Amino acid sequence: MKKAGLFLLIVALCVLLTACGEQKAYDEACALFEKGRYAEAIEMFRALGDYSDSSDRIRIAETRLAQTSTHVDTDKAESDRALKYADAFTYLESGRTREAYAAFSSLGSYRDAAEQLQRFTVVRGALTGEEIHVIRDGEDTLRGSAVYSYGADGRALTRSGFCRLEKYGWFEDFDYHYTYDQAGNVSHIDAISRSGALNFSIEYSYSENGRPIHEFYSDSFGTTREFIRSYTYRDVTDSTGSYTEVVESELFNGNAFPLESWQESYCEFGVSTMKCDSSTTVNHYAADGKRLDTVETLADGSKYVTTYSYGDVYLYTPAA
């Protein structure tokens, strides 16, 4: 009897100790639950099995954990959209209209993104740049490049570029500003050198088919110089639909230039037609009508070689 009583006492003590341990674990799990540390609380409640209301607590904790995760995801998504919206305007301020358009496009109905997209005009396949070389006696004597900017109507507003004569250490930046006639043709170009060394203007007249037939040039390099160039055309089309345009130009009153020594030195560079009364230009076009390159051969054998690049231009008109 004494042995049986001792055994029962030991069992009772074990049950009591186990119950105390479970209660402590349960209390810790409840504390985590109240602090919102649901993932940790769930693990502790699961370890308790059917103890007290652990199963109910698990269901409640899982629901709140899911709600919290959704809220965090929503807040992050909202933050990402706000950041991208701000980036779009930063792109606009720096002239990166392509990136701005892409940012607004990705925002869907966020704030006024759709309205901002309506303020863009996209010019597909616009002329965006040029690379220029002048070859004289087989030597690449001049290098240059230019990029174009466009107005909201899709017309080129400016052409900005440079020319560099490696052999003579000469370098000049130019900005060309375009004016258009009612037919949409370039009627006038004002070219301004950023150093102020040489500014010039060109006026064009056109035939009924929109090709320039006369060019009036004047500049102010020391004194005013002027000449008129006349153009005639002939086209050769190949079987692929691309074609070659051959332009013959003739220079009138080409002897009306003062500063003979300056003429000679400038013609030596191979960058002017002052003492050359004619030139032949060959333009190569793709089947879609885009000009691929231009090779102008002067009477002295010098060649101007220009290659063209194209791309989509994104124009933005701010709200009035």
Image (cartoon, grey):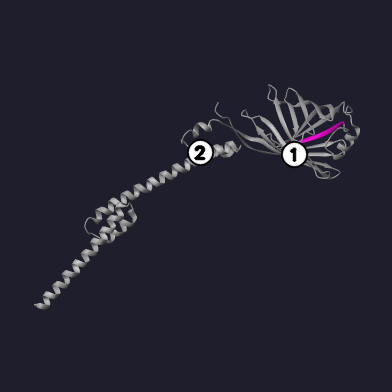
144 with respect to 149 (left or right): right
- Crowding around mark 1 (Cα neighbors within 10 Å: few <14, some 14 to 19, many 20+) is some
| Magenta highlight range | 277-283
Most frequent secondary structure within the magenta stretch: strand
220 with respect to 111 (left or right): right
Q: Quadrant location of residue 24? A: bottom left
Which residue is tagged 2? 85
Q: Earlier in the sequence, mark 2 or mark 1?
A: 2
Could you say where residue 58 lies in the image, as x and y percent from the top left? 28, 54
Q: Quadrant location of residue 304? A: top right
Could you say where residue 127 lies in the image, as x and y percent from the top left? 67, 35
Residue 302: image tag = none
Task: For mark 2, give the secondary structure.
Answer: helix
Contact between marks 2 and 1 (CB within 8 A): the answer is no
Task: For mark 1, give the secondary structure.
Answer: strand
Q: Residue at x 91, y 35 (%)?
A: 261
- Outermost residue toward the right in this view: 260
228 in the magenta segment: no
Q: Residue at x 76, y 25 (%)?
A: 204
1 with respect to 269 (left or right): left
Say which amino acid is labelled 2. Answer: Tyr
Is residue 130 or residue 224 the one in the foreground? 224
Q: Residue at x 75, y 39 (%)?
A: 162
Q: Quadrant of the C terminus?
A: top right
Is residue 77 or residue 7 the one in the foreground? 7
Could you say where residue 202 lies in the image, as x and y percent from the top left? 77, 27
Which residue is tagged 1? 162
Say which amino acid is labelled 1. Answer: Phe
Could you say where residue 260 lies in the image, as x and y percent from the top left? 91, 32
| Mark 2 → mark 1, Cα distance in angstroms | 36 Å
Is residue 223 or residue 45 the one in the foreground? 223
- Crowding around mark 2 (Cα neighbors within 10 Å: few <14, some 14 to 19, many 20+) is many
